[in-house]
Image (cartoon, rainbow, N blue to C red):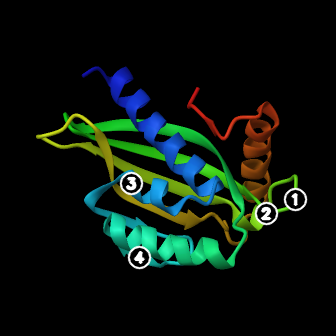
């Protein structure tokens, strides 16, 4: 598989992940993960496997109108013939708002695998880290501006340049 194909595969599953979150569809979000796939959430929570991911997100979605993601992929890197790493920046638009909340900016990392017995890509790991940039508000502003440009295009996920 070419590096372009790896990039496209990772970009597609990442877009599906954010779309499922934005629709508050815990089952669709969880279905993208490998059986032992792992999530490290914005608040440091950790979930392993589609069942736990679906259960935890269903509880969150039942009690909260979560903010919607808008993201820009920074890069993808092929780590092995069946493993691709995707790095992105993302912002969140709170429910009922039309603009990003800079306090919710994140750095996201996704590890996508294609198992030996299946060519269907699955998420092995998703890390969602706050991008507070303590003491460097100009970095928060720059990141927010960059993601705002993506939002203005109507995209949820913009590919790397």
Residue at image position (35%, 64%) is 50
Q: Residues within 10 Å of mark 1 (few under 14, many from 20)?
A: few
Q: Is residue 67 left or right of residue 119?
A: right
Among the two numbered marks 4 and 3 on one chain, the one whose residue lies closer to the N terminus: 3
Q: Secondary structure at mark 3?
A: helix
Q: Nearer the viewer, mark 2 or mark 3?
A: 3
Query: Dots 1 and 3: beta carbons under 8 Å?
Result: no
Q: Secondary structure at mark 4?
A: strand
Among the two numbered marks 1 and 3 on one chain, the one whose residue lies closer to the N terminus: 3
- In the image, residue 65 sits, relative to residue 100, either above or below, namely below
Mark 4 — residue? 46
Q: CA distance from mark 2 to mark 1?
A: 5 Å
Q: Secondary structure at mark 1?
A: loop
Mark 1 — residue? 97
Q: Position of residue 56 (x, y in %)?
A: 47, 76
Query: Dots 2 and 4: beta carbons under 8 Å?
Result: no
Q: CA distance from mark 4 to mark 3?
A: 17 Å
Q: Quadrant of residue 133?
A: bottom right
Q: CA distance from mark 4 to mark 1?
A: 28 Å
The C terminus: image quadrant: top right
Q: Which mark is residue 31?
A: 3
Mark 2 — residue? 94
Among the two numbered marks 2 and 4 on one chain, the one whose residue lies closer to the N terminus: 4
Among the two numbered marks 2 and 3 on one chain, the one whose residue lies closer to the N terminus: 3
Q: Is residue 66 left or right of residue 57?
A: right
Q: Is residue 44 left or right of residue 67?
A: left
- In the image, residue 22 sits, relative to residue 82, either above or below, namely below
Q: Nearer the viewer, mark 4 or mark 3?
A: 3
Q: Nearer the viewer, mark 1 or mark 3?
A: 3
Q: Position of residue 34 (x, y in %)?
A: 28, 55
Query: Dots 4 and 3: beta carbons under 8 Å?
Result: no
Number of numbered labels in the structure image: 4
């Amino acid at each position: 598989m070419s590096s372009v194909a790896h990039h496209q595969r990772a970009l597609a599953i990442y877009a599906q992940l954010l779309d499922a979150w934005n629709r508050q569809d815990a089952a669709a979000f969880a279905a993208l993960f490998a059986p032992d796939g792992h999530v490290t959430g914005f608040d440091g929570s950790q979930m392993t496997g589609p069942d736990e991911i679906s259960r935890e997100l269903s509880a969150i979605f039942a009690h909260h109108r979560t903010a919607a993601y808008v993201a820009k992929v920074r890069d993808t890197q092929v780590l092995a013939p069946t493993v691709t790493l995707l790095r992105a920046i993302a912002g969140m638009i709170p429910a009922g708002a039309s603009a990003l909340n800079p306090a919710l900016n994140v750095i996201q990392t996704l590890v996508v695998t294609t198992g030996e017995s299946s060519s269907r890509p699955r998420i092995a790991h998703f890390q969602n880290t706050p991008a507070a940039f303590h003491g460097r508000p100009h970095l928060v502003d720059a990141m927010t501006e960059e993601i705002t440009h993506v939002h203005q295009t109507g995209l949820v996920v913009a590919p790397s340049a």
